Amino acid sequence: MSAKVFSEARILESWGRNASAWTIAVRDRKIDSRVQVTDRAIVEAILSRRPGSVLDLGCGEGWLVRELAARNIEALGVDAVPGLIADAMAAGGGGFLQVSYEDLATGKHGVLVDVIACNFSLLGKESVEDVFRTAPLLLNPHGSLIVQTLHPVFACGDLPYQDGWRAGSWAGFSADFTDPAPWYFRTLDSWVELFVNNGFRLLEVREPRHPQTQTPASVIFIAEPPA
């Protein structure tokens, strides 16, 4: 496929079209892996760092911000997709801001937190590399970057186990979803290299398992930035 199909811009376009469908799917608890495993897993990972403040980077419709705010944690959710931020703000329960990752990293928004959480929100190539380069600027001393993403071993499918753009799919979702976003596949080694090459110290790698299949539903990285 063409470079235009596999691009950062296409990711945002797709999520813009599917914002309402996604909000409904999350709030009506229609995504089994989230209900059974991954929602709880990211909350537990964040709480393990005992933060006073959290930035949910790519917050979607805002469920994680609301969950953390209910636990008396100062939580801010940011997303570049207008429809998702509109849904998050309408539900309330925390702070929300429509902003791109790149704009946030300029520092003009005054964001400085104990934990940056990226919950299935790191989908591109260059944009993700930018997040790793700039995340330390948004973290308090001894802060943490926590990333939950698809487990590469189980998300690879029948394609070669190597980095590269992949076509998206809404398989298992309702017919309300359309035009799936592409995403950039990284091997487990490549994820680790992203942390190490940007000076992060990897503290934990968790593999939350589905209670029925006992296979990992995701992988979670917990890391500290350069001192």
Image (cartoon, rainbow, N blue to C red):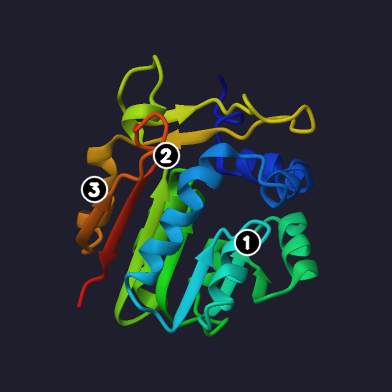
Q: Quadrant of the C terminus?
A: bottom left
Give amino acid for label 2: Leu
Give amino acid for label 1: Trp
Front position in the image: 37 or 186: 37
- Disc 3, SS: helix
Which residue is depicted at the point 76% across and 47% down?
24
Q: Which mark is residue 150?
A: 2
Q: Would you call the spot at circle 1 few (<14 residues within 10 Å), some (14-19), or many (20 or more)?
A: many
- Residue 93 in the image: above or below residue 133: below
Q: Position of residue 43 (x, y in %)?
A: 45, 63
Which residue is depicted at the point 61% across and 41% down?
11
Q: Locate residue 136: give its quadrant.
A: bottom left
Q: Which mark is residue 30?
A: none
- Disc 2, SS: loop
Q: Locate residue 100: give its quadrant.
A: bottom right
Q: Locate residue 139: give its quadrant.
A: bottom left
Which residue is depicted at the point 38% across and 25% down?
156
> Could you tell which of marks 2 and 1 lies nearer the N-terminus?
1
The residue wearing badge 3 is 192
Front of the two marks 2 and 1: 1
> Could you tell which of marks 3 and 1 lies nearer the N-terminus?
1
Which residue is depicted at the point 22% across and 48% down?
193
Query: How far apart in space, not on screen, are marks 2 and 3 (Cα)?
Result: 14 Å
> Does 21 sit left or right of 71 as displayed?
right
The residue wearing badge 1 is 63
- Is there CB contact under 8 Å for labels 3 and 1? no
Give amino acid for label 3: Val
